[in-house]
Amino acid sequence: MTQKHTISALVENHFGVLCRVAGLFSSRGFNIDSLSVGETEDPSISRMTIVVGGDDSVLEQVVKQLDRLIDVIRVIDITQGAFVERELMLVKVKADTSTRAEIIQIAEVFRAHIVDVCPRSMTIEVTGKNDKIQAIIGMLSSFGIEEIARTGTVALLRDSATQ
Amino acid sequence: MASNPQTTASGSTPGEMSGADILVESLIREGVEVLFGYPGGASMEMHQSLTRSNIQVVLCRHEQGEIFAAEGYAKASGKVGVCMATSGPGATNLVTGLADAKMDSVPLVAITGQVSTAVIGRDAFQETPIIEVTRQITKHNYLVDRIEDIPRVVKEAFFIASSGRPGPVLVDIPKNVQQSVCVPDFPETVSIRSYTPNQLHASRAQIQEVAQAILESKRPLIYAGGGIVTADASEELREFARKTRIPVAQTLMGLGVFPQTDPQSLQMLGMHGSVYANYAINHADLLLAFGVRFDDRVTGKLEEFCKHGRIVHIDIDPSEINKNKVAHLPIVSDIKYALQELNSIVVPGDYQVWCDEIETWREKHPFTYKDVEDVILPQYAIEMLYKMTDGKAIISTGVGQHQMWAAQFYPFDEPRRWLTSGGLGAMGFGLPAALGAQLAFPDALVVDIDGDGSFAMNVQELATLYAEKIPVKTMILNNQHLGMVVQWEDRFYKSNRGHTFIGDPEAAQAHEDMNIPPSHAIFPDYVAIAKGFRVPAERAERKEDLVPAIDRMISSNGPYLLDVVVPYQEHVLPMIPSGMTFADIITE
């Protein structure tokens, strides 16, 4: 069954590792929905969070092929367990005196922050799971979205579920 | 001599060495005796250092030749093959060999010179980003931008290339790093936290499960591949097969892991494998897949492959398990270890009914061909070579019909005598691979069985044979066509020739009219070409000429080329068309 999987990979924080991972996905015909990467608590290690769609056999291959890369230290399909995942979005939406108040209200409902305001537009910062991000996009689209920048998902396993 | 850092030519401070000298010293510490290379601006510094070492440098005449030679050396000896090329075109010419070594799991370290770090990324002369280019076709690669890293990187490169599932590692060293100096620190051990291949052993419970599956089976079959060669587990496989009495089919990469002349051997399986091996796969109730990867040339249509049997799959590479075919008993393990453990508990089974059934298939469908009086058939030429060399030669091949016929008609009783480009199917492999194997085994008889198309692709290596006095023999099965493509044209494209004739266009009609064209129409003249490279050569066209010609070839002391003219109408049979099943097998 095709579904979204969130894979977390700990990799050596080297030059070129991102290329190795991204190249693996394209050369093996796996589609990446999102990929985010950043340093971990250990500066020599980066964490890559990759959201990929596919059935279980595709996922099995993705994880094994990643594990096969020399620079990859550990790979887990965190969708297997309880986990928290978040995405960050900056969205610039058209706003004037007639719509500004309503947009601010929507932002409050989504616990988003207004990070920039000008007479013709506002920029909103929102974090959350993918469905929350999609929901606020839906709410704001009627005002006219000018630009969107999204980070892709980052995720960690919940310790609370395993203890 | 470079093995003593104090006496190398570089550095004024005691113990100080140049990057190039450090590299060469690192190679010596890895036990490198032979290196295949072709110098250029970005690698000449390392070649200068090599002149001060005891490493034998073989100057091949093309980088593709040098890397195939390194593969031949590695495949025949089991040691890591080493080659060296310059930046840019030198490095890109290694690409096919790297892809080949990745596909066939050949331990290889390729060292490339790179432009200086100051100009990397500026489209400098002979600059290519070879690390980017080769990322997906190497097991791992390194750009060494600090001289201090050279000893560690070389040590890691050899470890990665030769451990776990072996493969090619490329080390790219900018020229300024080769030229700078430091006091090196050569590590004794290697430790890579993300790579620990030596811990892959089947559990006791898994071994018990396999033994139990064998006990429950009435029609078991061993499907043995290149992993057995790599793991040096041929003896263990033989013991396992003899103890259990289970018949053995071998992949193209696994030929020789079990004696092919043994009645228990079912020869090669797959697209051009024996009818009886393929029938046996379909009728087996238990398939013991050892060191194999369920390649499409073996399985045909995946859903139909071994449809009635349970599958035990043992391989050292976890990503091979369930990649193409789901295994009922998947085991990630060093196959040598797994077989040793199995051998301590398995007992002989009674498979007489099963073996009798296989024998009836074998009697009905042996590897065969319809011999004719007037011309030399390619199969006949290989059979004669087999007889006259007692089946003991090291054989390399190009890719195509001649390769499959060699696999069918030159049975091997030992591993590491069969050097072929299996997964990638890289034409031009035969001559350089033979050259590399000969350097590993100077006293062995090494014969490249080649096609006229494949041979032409690395014909320049005749120069290497002459210059280095390498006594490789080449037997070209010359049909003036790209025979395997012609065969597919005949079978699936109504014999429409899509650029598969490689003889003289002026003589094309003669080929259509006659089985064998007149001598003067054969093109190019390989005997004349060989003579240009000072390699003795002759052509055999009539059947009665063949045996004396092979005799002259194998009894000559140096390199020798025998151009055997054969008809192009022969097809490699049996044949399971791509993506089909054993039931679709073509036998005539």
Image: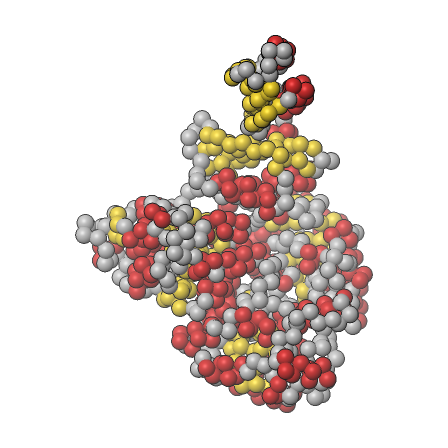
- Could you say where residue B156 lies in the image, as x and y percent from the top left? 42, 48
What's the residue at 50%, 39% (across, down)?
A18
What's the residue at 49%, 36% (across, down)?
A11
Outermost residue, bottom direction? B544
Name the image quarter holding residue B404: bottom right
Q: How many marks?
A: 0
Is residue B365 visible in this depiction of the protein?
Answer: no
Looking at the figure, which quarter contains the N terminus of chain A? top right
Q: Nearer the viewer, residue A60 or B4?
A: A60
- Could you say where residue A73 lies in the image, as x and y percent from the top left? 50, 37
Does residue B244 appear to the left or right of B257 in the view shown?
right
What's the residue at 45%, 79% (across, down)?
B533
Does residue B61 appear to the left or right of A59 in the view shown?
left
Looking at the figure, which quarter contains the C terminus of chain A? top right
Say if B561 sits above or below B250 in the image.
below
Say if A94 sits above or below B460 in the image.
above
Name the image quarter holding residue B146: top left
